[in-house]
Image (cartoon, grey):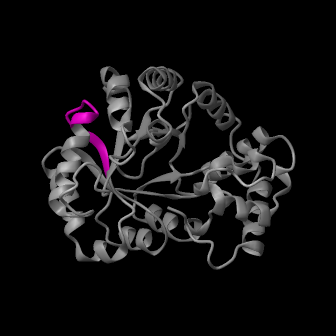
Amino acid sequence: MERRAFGSTGMQVSVLGFGGSEIGFEAAGQETTTRLLNAALDAGLNVIDTAECYIDSETLIGNAVAHRRDEFFLFTKCGHNSGFESEADWDPAMLRKSIERSVRELKTDRVDLVQLHSCSEELLREGEVIDVLVRAREAGLTRFIGYSGDGAAAEYAVSTGLFDALQTSCNIADQEAIAGAIPAALARGMGVIAKRPIANAVWRHGGARPPNAYHHDYHERIVALDYPFLAGDANDGVATALRFTLMVPGVDVAIVGTTNPARWAANAELARRGPLPAAEFEAIRKRWHEIARPDWVGLT
């Protein structure tokens, strides 16, 4: 699998990474997670991205692949008071505990990247939440620190010069960051992670509204954008969408989540098709500029 330099961190990351939200929220279970992650590592993936609030995702990942820790880069996030009922979200003490717990659950001595998980611009400007990550890096709990989020908050996070990495939404239905946070991050030598890189493949529902409300905004955008390449085979649409995201200048790795080992293998094969023809990439960008409304901002 193709690998790219992750900003100026020195890490060489696979262009596809595994996203840990689905295994937690969809209750994949240990057996499925173990089979899925080991198969992905065998296929050349070397990035696993999760978060403390993805139910038991960190525990599942730690149990599944801790014995292969030297084969992959491990990213997690903090900031949503999961299991610390006596403390508010973004409380510095809670964040410190959360990072320490993540390291334990993932069965490692340190992670490669800890990210603030959709923290507001206001809190970023106050500085305390960033200080927690800086101290975690100094304590050896993480090698690098990052921000995961969208819009003005992501652009501010990049502008501080304090983060090593940015994770932000980037796909055929979510292109705000392509002219905003991503080029700014690239200019600062930050690693860039594209989340939701295939826009949740909402077209697989045959034009019907997806049952998951989390996907409704993208469904409405895709209906309005009416890309010609989505009129045919759904998997060909996924291939074009994924290759579009991977062609965005500055994107180093696209995080794809699944609970189906076969789906991971299929996505890896789609990525191997290589870059889109430049004309196809520009046609998608042109359609976005023609149709996108001002309120089509990056989705968390």
Membership of 238 in magenta stretch: no
Instruction: For the N terminus, give its image quadrant.
Output: top right
Residue 186 in sight here:
yes
Q: Position of residue 295 (x, y in %)?
A: 62, 77
Q: Residue at x 77, y 74 (%)?
A: 290
Residue 226 is left or right of residue 289, and the answer is right
Q: Position of residue 59 (x, y in %)?
A: 32, 32
Q: Is residue 139 above or below residue 120?
A: above
Q: Please state which of residues 148 and 137 is positioned toward the viewer in this rendering.
A: 148
Q: Is residue 87 left or right of residue 185?
A: left
Q: Residue visible at 31% across and 67% down?
A: 161
For the image, the number of numbered tags is 0
Image spot of residue 167 (x, y percent): 45, 56
**Residue closer to the observer: 183 or 218:** 218
The residue that appears at 51% across and 26% down in the rendered structure is 40
**Residue extent of the magenta highlight:** 104-114
Magenta-colored stretch includes residue 111? yes
- Asked which quadrant contains residue 107, the reply is top left
Relative height, residue 129 to residue 7 (above, below): below
Residue 242 against residue 14 in the figure, above or below: below
Q: Nearer the viewer, residue 286 or 114?
A: 114
Q: Residue at x 50, y 25 (%)?
A: 36
- Does any portion of residue 110 appear in the rendered image? no
Closer to the camera in the image, 56 or 113 = 56
**Residue 260 image position (x, y, % from top left):** 58, 29
